[in-house]
Image (spheres, helix red, strand yellow):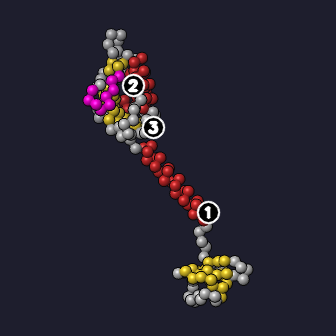
Amino acid sequence: MKHTGKVINIDKNKVFIVTKDKEFLTVKKNKIEPIVGQIYTGEAKNPVSSTLKYIIFAISILILFSAYTLFQSFSPKATIIAEMTDFNGKVKFEINKNNKIINVSSRNTTGLEIIDTTNVVGNYLNDGLIILFDNAISEKKLSIPDGHNFGQINIFISNNKFNDDVNLNEFIEHSEKNKFIVQINKNTGEF
């Protein structure tokens, strides 16, 4: 839309005018060179409103926060290796800062058989270990100890980026009810 008014200032490609209705406008500079104090006609320049600038800024902050949260949710905080000595299987868990399992793997066939039949990704570490433990017993990969002998489960905690305490109390209690001793090594070399 074209507007006509008296030129009050010139800045590169913008011409500032006052219309006969006393309205201040910014128009685009065209082929005719404007002169301060003269009448000038040009097409209105649509400035980005300050409200729109704040909305764009707020959306940018929200996107950055969401990206950071997603990154933190899926980046591993620590690696947990559970070794159940009865069936000689090792299962490796990677957990995030919320102690949720984000990856499960194994390098031996017994461990692979158990994780193939059990989905624990997305569960809290204690819950995932309990599910895996119960599944190993139900599939007879892990035998229930008799009254005289106890089974043994070794837990190795490594790559703990924040040196946070990994709470395994629920799993330890569940294992002890089934006559298994849980030993935890926090990468110190001893149980």
> Which of the pair 80/187 is nearer the observer?
187
Residue span colored magenta = 182-190
Q: Is residue 19 above or below residue 173?
A: below
How many numbered marks, from 0 up?
Answer: 3
Q: Residue at x 36, y 36 (%)?
A: 163
Tell me if I can see residue 57 in this picture. yes
The question of residue 61 being in magenta is answered with no
Q: Earlier in the sequence, mark 3 or mark 1?
A: 1
Please tell me whether mark 2 sits on a helix, a strand or a loop: helix
Please tell me whether mark 1 sits on a helix, a strand or a loop: helix
Alpha carbon of mark 2 to alpha carbon of mark 3: how far?
21 Å
The mark lying in front, picked from 2 and 3, is: 3
> Which of the pair 148/88 is nearer the observer?
148
Q: Is residue 31 above or below residue 99?
A: below
The spot of residue 82 in percent (x, y) is 34, 29
Mark 1 Cα shell of 10 Å, populated few (<14), some (14-19), many (≥20): few
Mark 3 Cα shell of 10 Å, populated few (<14), some (14-19), many (≥20): few
Amino acid type at mark 1: Thr
Please name the residue that numbered disc 3 is placed on: 98
Please tell me whether mark 3 sits on a helix, a strand or a loop: loop
Please name the residue that numbered disc 2 is placed on: 133
Residue 75 horizontal side relative to residue 24, left or right: left
Q: Quadrant of residue 177?
A: top left
Image quarter (top left, top right, bottom left or bottom right) of the N terminus? bottom right
